[in-house]
Each structure stands twice: as structure tokens, then as C-alpha cells.
Image (cartoon, rainbow, N blue to C red):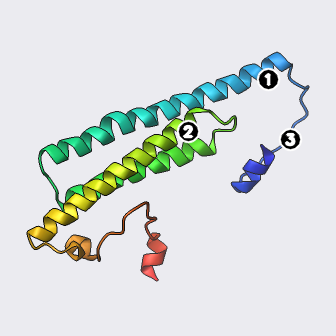
Amino acid sequence: MLRRIEGAHGEYHLLPLRKLSEEEDAKLAQEFLEQTEKHYEEIIENCEVNFTKEIEFETFRQNFTYEEAEEIRVEFEKITHWFERVRDRDWFNSPREVDVRSWIDRCETMLEQFEAKVYEVQEKVGNHPGLLAGRGPRPRGRQRRPSPEAKAV
């Protein structure tokens, strides 16, 4: 635990306490695990309900625009950042992490397929992908955006 705190550039103080009983130690660990699993369940629900339904709805509407693709990508990035924050606090290695990773992979695949359709449709109508926010064609897969400091340099 201390290595994780130090690795995150955190600070701590060790205070002398008596050793917890095995029962109390197990109880605390279980409470942390349950809390983490609730967060993982929320992420899965967000993937299942919100993200999936958004792509299905926009596909049904045939709303294959760069703006929609960008909006959906932002939602995907929110999900992945949320997962990373929960994973950082998952000190007891919840088995639900595997399920979340699977859902994130599914969401990424759905996003990439949607983006591919957007580029296909927009190319047919003569809109070049480079017109999206003044950038070149959007790379596929998880991409980290440059920090504001990097843009200023």
C-alpha cells in the first residue's frame, strides 16, 4: 500500500496501532472490494446502456457525421478515464475488472466501426476527414490527446 501511495506522489504518516484481528481485517478488505465492484458495475452499465445505445441510435438515424463521431469518442474517453481511476483504487483486485476491460474493448470496437462508417459516408459526399476541426484524418484506436502545454509549445 505504501509503495502505491509513494508511486502516486502521495504522502502518508505511519501511526502506531494495534494489529487488526483477522476478522476485522477481512471485513475492511471486503468493504473496499464491494465499493470497487459497485464502481465497476456502474462502468459496465454505462457501456451497456448509454454507450451502446448511443451508437445504435445514431446508426439507426444514419447520423454519420464527424461531429457525432467526435462526440462519441469523447464519451468513450470519459469511460476509459473513469475505469483508470477506479482501477487505481482497486487495491484488492476485484474480479470484475476483467468484465470491465471486456466491455471497454467492445465499446472501442463499436466506436472504430462507427468512425469507419463516418469516414466512408463523408468521403462519398466529398467531405475530407481533414476538415474535422482543422486536423488530418483521425487515427483509429485509443489515442491520448496532447496536453494544453504541448499545444502551446
Compared to residue 113, the image places residue 54 above or below, namely above
- What x and y, as percent, mark residue 24? 79, 18
- Answer yes or no: is residue 75 visible: no
Task: Give residue 131's quadrant in the image.
Answer: bottom left
- Disc 1 element: helix
> Is label 1 in contact with label 3 (beta carbons under 8 Å)?
no
Q: CA distance from mark 1 to mark 2?
A: 25 Å
Query: For the residue marked with disc 2, what is the amino acid?
Result: Val
Counting other residues with Cα less than 10 Å from the Cα at mark 1, is it few (<14), some (14-19), or many (20 or more)?
few
Q: Amino acid at mark 3?
A: Leu
How would you rate the neighbour count of disc 3 (Cα within 10 Å): few for under 14, some for 14-19, many for 20 or more?
A: few
Residue 32 in percent (x, y) is at: 65, 29
Give me the residue at 84% from left, 19% from top.
Answer: 22
Q: Earlier in the sequence, mark 1 or mark 3?
A: 3
- The front one of 16 and 100 is 100
Above or below for 95 versus 79: above
Q: Is residue 90 left or right of residue 49?
A: right
Residue corresponding to mark 3:
14
Point out which mark residue 25 bears: 1
Q: Earlier in the sequence, mark 1 or mark 2?
A: 1
Picture residue at 44% right of the left edge, 41% below the top? 103
Find the distance from the CA under tag 2 to the CA under tag 3. Answer: 33 Å
Tell me the crowding category of disc 2: few under 14, some 14 to 19, or many 20 or more residues within 10 angstroms, Cα based. few
| Viewer-proximal residue among 44 and 1 | 44
In this figure, which residue is indicated by the disc labeled 2? 98
